[in-house]
Amino acid sequence: MRSPVSILSKPFVADTVARLMAAGAARVQKPRPLFPEIPGRTGELAIPTRHGPMPATLYRPPGKAKGVYLNAHGGGFVVGGAIADDPLCRYLAEHAGVFVVNVDYVLAPHKRFPAPCEQVYDALRWAASPDREWAGARLCVGGQSAGGSLAAAASRLALRDGGPEIVLQVLHYPPLDLVTPAADKPARDDRVVIRPWMGEVFNTAYIPDVARRTDPLASPAWGTNADDLSGIAPALVITCEHDRLRAEAVTYAGKLEKAGALVEHYDIRGVDHGYDLLDGEPEVVRGVYEFLARHVERAVTA
């Protein structure tokens, strides 16, 4: 039985709550103080997209670049910013030896689906241009939470539109089914990070029309949307044991495996959604980032 619809599923209410959440997050937003030993060799970019210029931060590797990694942050498509992923981007630049392009895509309700998907895809096309200083380097795309959803969407757009070639997509605790209400998704207990009301606000602000949430770019793990993934970019899927969104990512990993596109599914034991940004043990975060960096380095040097 589906959970009853609440007032938070009304677009005007969800939009208002989303804006309040975004404003509150912006006042306190700062990266977690991890990996102080890794310097940030950064510069600012403005990437042209069909939805206007998109700000991004470029992280440079310490030596000759082996590839380029496009990163999209999380935040339910309505809050957050690229700065939250600074520790991850520094880590990948240092230990995978890649340029990292950390994008600040448009947020709902100001810009709704599919605008963020299209921006991330446009940034991939931009990164693949021969005019870039890393011209010819192999290209990866990845993200955490909502950013993982956008990485999956951009990979599907690359498959549909014939490029650019992506050697690895990284889906890190992503939401991949916006059709099923969050309240109907299994949770270990009532202390999980993703609460049902959050899902209602995020999904409604991002895609007010419930029927549109069945789009494969929004809900790649729902229904038959992933029944034919032949030719899609190789994928690393990372899930969290206690995450309410874990099951949909596991489902998608299974479909990727069936298509011969799953590099690995790694389930992090004992942690919940956003563990690396919130209160996960630093050594656990370091271990996962090390694992991720090895996969990225392997993909860009294969």
Image (tube, rainbow, N blue to C red):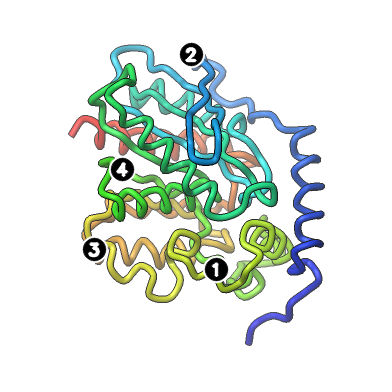
Per the rendering, the mark at residue 168 is 4
Q: CA distance from mark 2 to mark 4?
A: 23 Å
- The three-letter amino acid code for the residue at tag 1 is Arg
**Residue farthest along the left direction in this orientation:** 302
Dot 3 or dot 4: first in sequence order is 4
- The three-letter amino acid code for the residue at tag 2 is Arg
Q: CA distance from mark 2 to mark 3?
A: 38 Å
Dot 2 or dot 3: first in sequence order is 2
- The three-letter amino acid code for the residue at tag 4 is Leu
How busy is the neighbourhood of tag 3: few (under 14 within 10 Å), some, or many (20 plus)?
some
- The three-letter amino acid code for the residue at tag 3 is Ala
What residue sits 66% from the left and 50% below the top? 108
Instruction: Specify the quadrant that holds the C terminus.
Output: top left
Residue at image mark 2:
41
Dot 2 or dot 1: first in sequence order is 2
Dot 2 or dot 4: first in sequence order is 2
User: What element does badge 3 sit on?
Assistant: loop
Per the rendering, the mark at residue 212 is 1
- Confirm whether residue 167 shows in the render: no
Q: CA distance from mark 3 to mark 4?
A: 15 Å
Given this view, does label 4 or label 1 mark the residue nearer the observer? 1
Residue at image mark 3:
259
Q: CA distance from mark 3 to mark 1?
A: 25 Å
User: What element does badge 1 sit on?
Assistant: helix
Instruction: Specify the quadrant that holds the N terminus.
Output: bottom right
